[in-house]
Image (tube, helix red, strand yellow):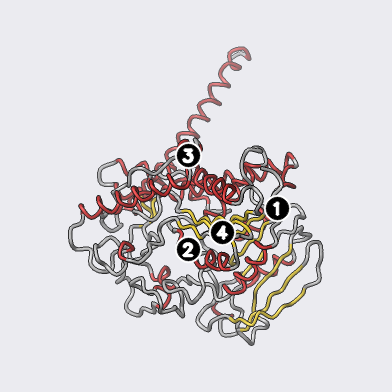
Amino acid sequence: MTGADAAPGRPGRLGSRVWKGLAGLAGALALVALGFGLVARGHADLRPWHQVVPQGEPAAAELDAGMNLATWLAREDAVLRDARTRVEAALRGDEGPSSRYAPGAPVNPGGYERDWNRTFELAAASPKGLVLLLHGMTDGPYSLRTLGARLHAEGFHVLALRLQGHGTTPAALLDARWEDWAAASRLGMRHLRAVGGGNLPLVVVGYSTGAALAVQHHLAALDDPALPRADRLVLLSPLLGLTRGAGFAPLVSALDRVPGFEKAAWLDVLPEYNPFKYNSFPVNGGWQSHRLVRAVADGLARAKRTGTIDRLPPILTFHSVLDTTVRSDAVVRMLYGALPANGSELVMYDVNRWNAFAPLFRPGQLDSVRRLFTAGPRAYTLRVVSNRDPGTRDAVEISVAPGAEARARRELGLAFPPEVFSLSHTAIPFPCSDPLYGIAPRTDEDFGVRLGTLALRGERHALQVPMEQLARLNCNPFFDDLAERTVAWVAGAGRRAGP
């Protein structure tokens, strides 16, 4: 074969190898999706609340066309009514009193004096400032009601939005898009700016997905001066880093159109015994989380590259060192590693280093805080809540100022409960007196179940709900300190600069 004959052949052989590689990758992805689909076939049977998608949730285009809060509330009422009517029409009568969708059940939120799945507003006669509350994925306004009430008692006008797809049926999240939630947050900010006449400071408090929405909005506002901006942010367990598996979501959920694989649209199909949070979790929820996290990461990278990141408002964050929903290192590295020296603070809750727990932790779990303090120069204040020493459950705050190495200590007058070895992603916004999630719940309210006091014992593999989920801590023993610090942070917000 001559050189002239060989040259044209090389692209063909290269192209063949590329196509073989792509085919191999496609085959591997198909096998992964099939594996997830086969696992999903083992889920419990889908019930009406897994199939009824409420009609009428406003999308981004409609919201951004000028929808106001009054119209939002009217639409919300229609959406919740549609969900209730259609689900109840499809019930088989075997739901039992522990299902939030069973008419008359103690955990059915329709029977409460106030349904905390709904948007709520706490008006102040002469407000000191304005606060927008944004909840997390599968959650609802209930998750921020205690902090909202505390801020309102201090003289702030508070608005807590129910994000689309929440508070109705888990199926409502099958078609949800994070862009619609972002548009809802813009509506909330427009409303509060109007309430304050453009002269009062505004703070956004976001929990989990709501925290990511708050950050994404303010990154977008760096490029769009027409977007309303807050003077400060408060983030609780911010959704800023996920496992890479979330990126497979569209491939996995595509199987739900194949007969016999209808459950592939769900990561979890569980009993719905919580009146204010879904227990079942659709694959699309993971996909929207993944897309939102990528949008935040891209926005941070763009802001650093253009130098506009210096215009981000100061951020106060509360996060647990142990968090199986969000990678704690991403909060530190991706967000706080990029922030300017603008007075931001990061509060991290350490594991309980009490001697009784030390032998129980996996190797490396006790090194997380050491890495925080030795990560190098930082432009923010780092505060870590930990044991005073391993011989006690009493807690102290260990803090380091921006650019410094010296550590200061502050007694909190609080302690780790004896049965608690760490906080969790879900624990941060709830006091331990919470009537639903608290380990020492108040008794002035009754929502039909006290999830924080469940202490189940029995044989393995008997329950539909994983024991790890039932044992997960859902309240924050340091909530009083969080609330005081948040009130001070909100009160310190000055007049806004910009639109």
Q: Which residue is mark 2?
A: 143
Q: Which residue is mark 1?
A: 495
The number of callouts visible is: 4
**Which quadrant would the C terminus be assigned to in this image?**
top right
Which numbered disc, 1 or 4, marks the residue that appears first in the sequence?
Answer: 4
How far across and how far down the image is residue 224, in percent?
Answer: 64, 37
Q: Amino acid at mark 4?
A: His
Q: CA distance from mark 3 to mark 1?
A: 28 Å
Q: Nearer the viewer, mark 2 or mark 1?
A: 1
- Residue 321 in sight from this viewpoint: no
Q: Amino acid at mark 1?
A: Arg
Residue drawn at 60 percent across, 67 percent down: 154
Secondary element type, mark 1: loop
Q: Nearer the viewer, mark 3 or mark 1?
A: 1
Which numbered disc, 4 or 3, marks the residue that appears first in the sequence?
Answer: 3
Q: Which residue is mark 3?
A: 60
Residue 251 vs residue 23, the one in the foreground: 251
Q: Which mark is residue 157?
A: 4
